[in-house]
Amino acid sequence: MRLILTLFLLLTALGLWEMFRHRWHRRRIPVRVHVNGSRGKSSVTRLIAAGLRAGEYRVFAKTTGSAARIIYPDGREAPISRRGGPNIREQLGIFRQCVNSGANALVLECMAVRPDLQWTTEHRIVKATHGVITNVRPDHLEAMGPRLEDVARNLSSTIPKRSKFFTAEYRFLPLMEGKAREFKTRFHLANAEDVKPEELEGFAYVELADNLSLALQVCESLGIGRQDALEHMRKVTPDPGALIPVRIQESDVQVEFINLFAANDPESTAFLWKHLALGERGDRTLALINIRADRMRRSKDLAPLFGRQVKAHKYVLIGEMTHVFADMIRRQGVAKDEIIDLGGKGPEAIWSRLVAESVGSTTVVGIANIGGAGVTLMELLEGKERAA
């Protein structure tokens, strides 16, 4: 009994010490930007961090997207290595590293999915001076749904108290504005129409007006001029999931690979397919769909797009449980001879088949998931592009 009591007191003491140490670190970071949302979090985190460097800020940033990264004040990046799965306690170490680096601003992508952990991350760990929600999309419905309104409500749990809040989400404006008012937080709505077409030029990847408008508004609230912020944002290192076309010449075939793996909800996929006029360029178009066994709910949600909003010459399936997805899209009206099932194949075999299916100028569009087969294929293609 005495041993149990001693262990309990020791654990309590360690917990209190960790809490007070974290508060000490947090007080030494006067600017804390917490970025949440369904899509674009990593891009917006990078844009804000880059824009703030145009001012007198030493910025430490962390993304949690396709591949988690730490971005140091001098712009260097390092991958985050983990023992086991992601855990929000990781954010405590990020605050400590931020202070140790001498930074006075932290831009942090929210890494929590469960609603209770999202609330804890903001109101117990970050306590943002500037909260951001990029948008609300039908993703992670198993954790935050089942309705889109539930997703919006759960994302809104990271709106900070007595601070500033920014969003580009219009559909749930009353909900978010009401929550900000409840928390005595100043509400800011970003407008993509404020971004001029020429402001979207000069990036090494395809950036969206919503993301840029949001990042610029946050930077302007911190005293950074629009042109200065833009200049630094255009130099940003793209996130591994960023939309960067890769062009490869194979004998008499030119293949352009467009990475939409990160846009893995139906609304975002359909929007980008239309926005980029995919399937309407006159080129042959192949939809490359990466299936994950642990994301079959996502696959089921995406299936109705194919053959309708997402029209391609062929639908190439890679990854896991591809036969299940093939049945799904056949029930949506996709012909059997339009489906190429490469489930379980490695990147070299996948690429060889894509080239064999290409004619003249062909566009291949990666969809659904980047994990697993998507990552290894992207590594192969980036190596081929560098070697060209």
Image (cartoon, helix red, strand yellow):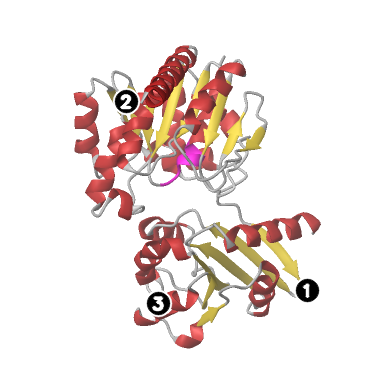
Which amino acid lies under the numbered mark 1 shown in the image of this protein?
Answer: Ser
Q: Say which residue appears at 49% left-offset and 34% top-offset.
A: 45
- Identify the mark nearer the N-term, 3 or 1: 1
Residue 83 vertical position relative to residue 97 in the rendered view, above or below = below
Which amino acid lies under the numbered mark 3 shown in the image of this protein?
Answer: Ile
Is residue 47 within the magenta segment? no
Q: Give the number of the disc on residue 160.
A: 2
Q: Position of residue 311 (x, y in %)?
A: 44, 73
In the foreground, 238 or 119 = 119
Q: Say which residue appears at 20% left-offset and 37% top-offset.
A: 175
Rounded to the nearest angstrom, the CA distance separating label 3 from label 2 is 42 Å
Name the mark nearer the viewer: 1 or 2. 2
Q: Which residues are magenta?
A: 39-44
Element type at mark 1: loop
Image quadrant occupied by the N terminus: top left
In the foreground, 250 or 375 = 375
Quarter location, residue 41:
top left
Q: Position of residue 271 (x, y in %)?
A: 40, 57
Residue at numbered disc 1:
251
- Identify the mark nearer the N-term, 1 or 2: 2
Q: Say which residue appears at 53% left-offset and 23% top-offset.
A: 52
Residue at numbered disc 3:
329
Rounded to the nearest angstrom, the CA distance separating label 1 from label 2 is 55 Å
Rounded to the nearest angstrom, the CA distance separating label 3 from label 1 is 33 Å
**Contact? badges 1 and 2 (CB < 8 Å):** no
Q: Residues within 10 Å of mark 2 (few under 14, many from 20)?
A: many
